[in-house]
Image (tube, rainbow, N blue to C red):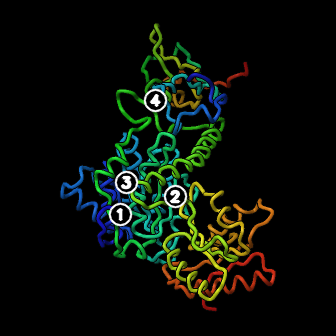
Amino acid sequence: MTKPESEWTWKELPVGNVILEPGNASSYRTGDWKSFKPVLNKELCIHCGLCYIFCPDMAYNLDEEGYFIADLFYCKGCGICATECPTRAITMVVEEEK
Amino acid sequence: MGKRVGMEVSIAAAEAVKQANVDVISAYPITPQTHIVEHLSEIVANGELDAEFFCVESEHSAMSICIGSEATGARSFTCTSAQGLALMAEMTYIASGLRLPILMIVANRTLSAPLSIWNDHSDTMMIRDCGWIQFFVENGQEVYDHVFISYRVGEDRSVLFPTIINMDGFILSHVIEPIELIDQEKVDKFLPPYQPLYRLHPDQPVTMGAFALPAIFAETKKAQEVALRASLPKILEVWKEFGDLTGRYYHPVETYKAEDAETLLVTMGSIGETASVAVDRMREEGRSVGLVKIRLWRPFPFEALKQATLHAKNLVVIDRAVSVGGPGGPVASEVKAAIYGEPLRPTVYNFIAGISGRDVAPFDFIKMVDKAEIEIEEGKKDGYELYGVRE
């Protein structure tokens, strides 16, 4: 997105509010919706990838060490990953104000 | 001058849709709109028109398909009535929000309950604020003509809005009238192929119908509101061009013996023709009565209405729909709102007449004018009555 939606004036909107830039949802920060964030205990993780599969926002990515890590730019804090994790390796903790 | 032939108005409407060379027709049959889609179905089946005809399972789907096809750049058409329009209502707001120039003919019919198939304007008033350009036509010729006018206006890059042509069910849809058909060559010149501004195409992907958070929704509505109001000059321009082509000139507000009249009847739709007969009779008796007919309902023609009515003493506004528990009929409410800011303005008396197809004859208009003139003279400022109801 070229600029945050709160800065658009009505005159600048494309006719019918068409979005002309494909895939621009990837630049939309849904991460600031959350109040809890997932924290992974790597000792319990069995690399099964269920968190990656179940994440409704596709926020999980595989890192170089083979762990699935939530990208907090997108993670809305829904907690589905923590619920589905078979070894309880993920816990939801309150996200402190920065 | 084109060929003048006698035909049912619904058939004339379907022939106009064919001549407009639409790409997609998607409709569900409902009385009194049925003859239009039946005839279009035949036209497509006979190979007279190269279009996709979708027999959908509901009006909600009819409009949804039109939205999808119009978004790909296909000229799309649908028509409906009453309960069908109610089922479609959700999608009408989406078509205008996405600025897709679909054309819909509404053969106006009463909304249930009680169940009724007859004519009034309660169906279309339900979606008054759906953000479409909205015409009310008076006769079959106007229906035929406005099919071309609507596509031409709606598809213009400066407009891009869907259009509703309101035609009275049965009173127009099922009546045989003389229609002057326009030569195809002339139609093609007046209505070139649709060139969409944006369309769904894999070569240049776009998103239509995205989500808007509160931070931007008001801006989207303002853009829509300003654009619909700004379509008025284009409508006038296209009407002028159409008049030069056919000799039939249209205006947002039509007047009949109104210039010097003390009392003005205000009507919308086919009832205006009957009212003009009543005006003639009252004029013969030496009474100062005229007629104002609103053709363009959205964008509302504020200036034209003021110009036609402000000199009068009394306005007798005839509505064909009830706003139950509200301030009177929708037309009277808007006429009042339009003249409210004027220091010198006529007094408005509102009658609801001809609901659910009950006949309104010339003498009914005379009775309404009689009552309104007497009561306004006695000082009544808020005259409002469901005309002809048995006590």
The residue closer to the viewer here, A5 or A84, is: A5
- On screen, residue B230 versus residue B154, left or right, reads right
Q: Residue at x 40, y 69 (%)?
A: B140
The answer to whether tags 1 and 3 share a subunit is yes
**Amino acid found under the numbered disc labelled 3:** Phe
Q: Residue at x 76, y 67 (%)?
A: B345
Image mark for residue B134: 2
- On screen, residue B245 versus residue B280, left or right, reads left
> Which mark's residue is nearer the viewer, 2 or 4?
2
Q: Disc 4 marks which residue?
A: A54
Q: Say if mark 2 contacts mark 1, CB within 8 Å.
A: no
The answer to whether tags 4 and 3 share a subunit is no
Query: Residue B22 at what x, y percent from top left?
Result: 32, 50
Query: Residue B186 at what x, y percent from top left?
Result: 32, 52
**Amino acid found under the numbered disc labelled 4:** Phe
Does B241 appear above or below A39?
below
Q: Is residue B24 visible?
A: no
Q: Disc 3 marks which residue?
A: B77
**Amino acid found under the numbered disc labelled 1:** Ala
